[in-house]
Amino acid sequence: MLTLTENAAKMVRDLTSNTVDPEHAGLRIAARSAQDHELVVSLSEGPHDADEVIEVRGARVFLDREAASSLGDKALDAVETESGGVSFHVA
Protein backbone atom coordinates (compact mmCIF):
# COMPACT_ATOMS: atom_id res chain seq x y z
CA MET A 1 0.00 0.00 0.00
CA LEU A 2 1.22 3.52 -0.81
CA THR A 3 2.46 5.36 2.27
CA LEU A 4 2.61 9.12 2.82
CA THR A 5 5.40 11.05 4.47
CA GLU A 6 4.47 13.68 7.05
CA ASN A 7 5.23 16.37 4.42
CA ALA A 8 2.92 14.74 1.88
CA ALA A 9 0.11 14.37 4.41
CA LYS A 10 0.42 18.04 5.39
CA MET A 11 0.42 19.21 1.76
CA VAL A 12 -2.64 17.09 0.92
CA ARG A 13 -4.48 18.45 3.97
CA ASP A 14 -3.53 22.01 2.98
CA LEU A 15 -4.65 21.51 -0.63
CA THR A 16 -7.99 19.95 0.28
CA SER A 17 -8.81 22.41 3.07
CA ASN A 18 -10.16 24.93 0.54
CA THR A 19 -12.44 22.53 -1.35
CA VAL A 20 -16.24 22.52 -1.13
CA ASP A 21 -16.22 19.48 1.17
CA PRO A 22 -12.76 19.21 2.79
CA GLU A 23 -13.82 16.29 5.00
CA HIS A 24 -14.33 14.04 1.95
CA ALA A 25 -11.91 15.60 -0.55
CA GLY A 26 -8.53 14.17 -1.37
CA LEU A 27 -5.69 13.94 -3.81
CA ARG A 28 -6.50 11.53 -6.65
CA ILE A 29 -3.80 9.66 -8.55
CA ALA A 30 -4.94 7.88 -11.70
CA ALA A 31 -3.65 6.56 -15.00
CA ARG A 32 -4.15 9.02 -17.86
CA SER A 33 -5.87 6.23 -19.84
CA ALA A 34 -6.38 2.47 -19.51
CA GLN A 35 -3.44 1.81 -21.85
CA ASP A 36 -1.18 4.55 -20.47
CA HIS A 37 1.31 4.12 -17.62
CA GLU A 38 1.51 7.87 -17.02
CA LEU A 39 -0.14 8.94 -13.77
CA VAL A 40 -2.11 12.14 -13.27
CA VAL A 41 -2.53 13.89 -9.93
CA SER A 42 -5.59 16.04 -9.23
CA LEU A 43 -7.81 17.22 -6.40
CA SER A 44 -11.05 15.29 -6.07
CA GLU A 45 -14.18 15.93 -4.03
CA GLY A 46 -14.22 12.22 -3.21
CA PRO A 47 -13.07 8.83 -4.44
CA HIS A 48 -14.36 7.28 -7.65
CA ASP A 49 -16.25 3.98 -7.32
CA ALA A 50 -13.28 1.61 -7.68
CA ASP A 51 -10.63 3.82 -6.03
CA GLU A 52 -8.47 2.60 -3.19
CA VAL A 53 -8.67 5.14 -0.35
CA ILE A 54 -5.64 5.85 1.81
CA GLU A 55 -6.10 8.07 4.84
CA VAL A 56 -3.08 9.17 6.83
CA ARG A 57 -3.19 11.81 9.58
CA GLY A 58 -6.32 13.38 8.09
CA ALA A 59 -5.00 13.40 4.51
CA ARG A 60 -6.92 11.37 1.93
CA VAL A 61 -5.42 9.96 -1.26
CA PHE A 62 -7.50 8.13 -3.86
CA LEU A 63 -5.82 5.67 -6.21
CA ASP A 64 -7.40 4.15 -9.29
CA ARG A 65 -6.65 0.48 -9.99
CA GLU A 66 -3.61 1.19 -12.18
CA ALA A 67 -2.11 3.69 -9.74
CA ALA A 68 -2.69 1.37 -6.77
CA SER A 69 -0.89 -1.41 -8.62
CA SER A 70 2.04 0.82 -9.65
CA LEU A 71 2.46 2.57 -6.30
CA GLY A 72 1.72 -0.29 -3.91
CA ASP A 73 5.19 -0.45 -2.37
CA LYS A 74 6.10 3.24 -2.70
CA ALA A 75 6.03 6.34 -0.52
CA LEU A 76 4.58 9.70 -1.55
CA ASP A 77 6.54 12.77 -0.47
CA ALA A 78 5.93 16.46 -1.14
CA VAL A 79 7.81 19.72 -1.01
CA GLU A 80 6.74 23.31 -1.48
CA THR A 81 8.24 24.84 -4.62
CA GLU A 82 9.87 28.28 -4.79
CA SER A 83 6.77 29.60 -6.58
CA GLY A 84 4.52 28.48 -3.69
CA GLY A 85 3.21 25.36 -5.40
CA VAL A 86 3.56 21.74 -4.38
CA SER A 87 5.75 19.10 -5.97
CA PHE A 88 4.92 15.46 -5.21
CA HIS A 89 7.56 12.74 -5.52
CA VAL A 90 7.30 8.97 -5.35
CA ALA A 91 10.14 6.97 -3.83
Image (tube, rainbow, N blue to C red):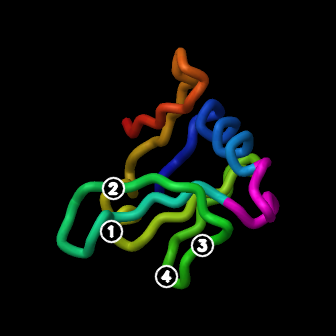
- Kindly give the residue lying farthest to the top in the view shown: 82
Sort mark 2 into few (<14), some (14-19) or many (20+) by Cα contacts within 10 Å. some
Image location (x, y in percent) of residue 34 = 25, 75
Compared across the picture, whether 47 is left or right of 37 comes to right
Compared across the picture, whether 78 is left or right of 59 comes to left
Image location (x, y in percent) of residue 88 = 47, 36
Element class at badge 1: helix
> Is residue 16 shown above or below 65?
above
* Residue indicated by mark 3: 47
Label 1 or label 2, whichever lies nearer to me, is: 2
Sort mark 3 into few (<14), some (14-19) or many (20+) by Cα contacts within 10 Å. some
| Mark 1–mark 2 CB contact (< 8 Å) | yes
Residue type at mark 2: give it: Leu
* Residue indicated by mark 2: 39
Mark seen at residue 66: 1
- Kindly give the residue lying farthest to the left in the view shown: 35
* Residue indicated by mark 4: 50
Task: Indicate which disc, 3 or 2, sits on the residue closer to the N terminus.
Answer: 2
Element class at badge 4: loop
Residue at position x 62%, y 31% in the image: 7
Compared across the picture, whether 30 is left or right of 62 comes to left
Residue type at mark 1: give it: Glu
Answer whether residue 90 is magenta in the image. Answer: no
Residue type at mark 3: give it: Pro
Magenta-tinted stretch: 17-25
State the separation of the CA atoms marked 3 and 2.
16 Å
| Mark 4–mark 3 CB contact (< 8 Å) | no
Element class at badge 3: loop
